[in-house]
Amino acid sequence: MAKRMTVAGLSLSAAAFIGLVISEGFAPTATIPVKGDRPTVGFGSTYHANGSPVTLGESVTPVNALKIAKAHISKDETRFRKSLAGAELSQAEYDLYIDWLYQYGIGRWLKSPMRTHLLDGEYRQACDALLLLQYRTVAGYDCSTPNNKRCYGVWTRAQDRHRQCVNSLGTPQ
């Protein structure tokens, strides 16, 4: 198990940032990536650094997309750390919850069972909550449905996060 420290002393690692943008993929023009989702541009950004929403058809360069993603993450990290005041995480745990936060947003994080479990020191339960139904659906469709072509990546990403989370605990799945 990796050493834990208070969340206040952590920030997203460079390796996790690179992994996040790779998993999001780059879209130079804003599109709706999954039926029922918001328009996204660059590396999965739904909002610009100034807070305005992304609109269909707008364009972005890779460099500006990285700046937007970093600004979004920095803003959310501040709220994330405040939401876990006094809690401890390893760097690996912190990184994967920020990855989750980037996909689902701070509003869903604040109401999530992961947050509650982490505040209670229930690390395995927090990992397991990554697989809950509400985090594997898009517009009411269960993305864990085998062989679906609509949003299967949402489910595989959730499974990857869960695997990484459990592995960071040092216990077998």
Image: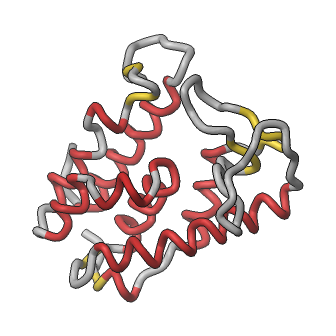
Left or right of 68? Residue 128 is: left
When the figure is inspected, residue 145 is found, relative to residue 80, above or below; the finding is above
Q: Nearer the viewer, residue 150 or 5?
A: 150
* Residue drawn at the location 33% of the way across and 45% of the way down: 163
Where is residue 116, by image quadrant?
A: bottom left
In the rendered image, the residue lying farthest to the top is 147
Image location of residue 87, percent across then percent down:
22, 78
Where is residue 3, by image quadrant?
A: bottom left
Left or right of 57? Residue 16 is: left
* Residue drawn at the location 37% of the way across and 32% of the way down: 136
Where, quadrant-wise, is the N terminus in this rendering?
A: bottom left
Q: Nearer the viewer, residue 79 or 99?
A: 79
Image location of residue 128, percent across then percent down:
21, 45
Image location of residue 67, percent across then percent down:
75, 68
Where, quadrant-wise, is the C terminus in this rendering?
A: top left
When the figure is inspected, residue 106 is found, relative to residue 144, above or below; the finding is below
In the rendered image, the residue lying farthest to the front is 52
When the figure is inspected, residue 84 is found, relative to residue 131, above or below; the finding is below
How is the protein colored in the picture? secondary structure
* Residue drawn at the location 65% of the way across and 31% of the way down: 33
Left or right of 169? Residue 32 is: right
When the figure is inspected, residue 123 is found, relative to residue 77, above or below; the finding is above
The tally of labels here is: 0
Where is residue 84, by image quadrant?
A: bottom left
* Residue drawn at the location 28% of the way across and 31% of the way down: 133
Image location of residue 118, percent across then percent down:
20, 66
Q: Nearer the viewer, residue 40 or 8?
A: 40
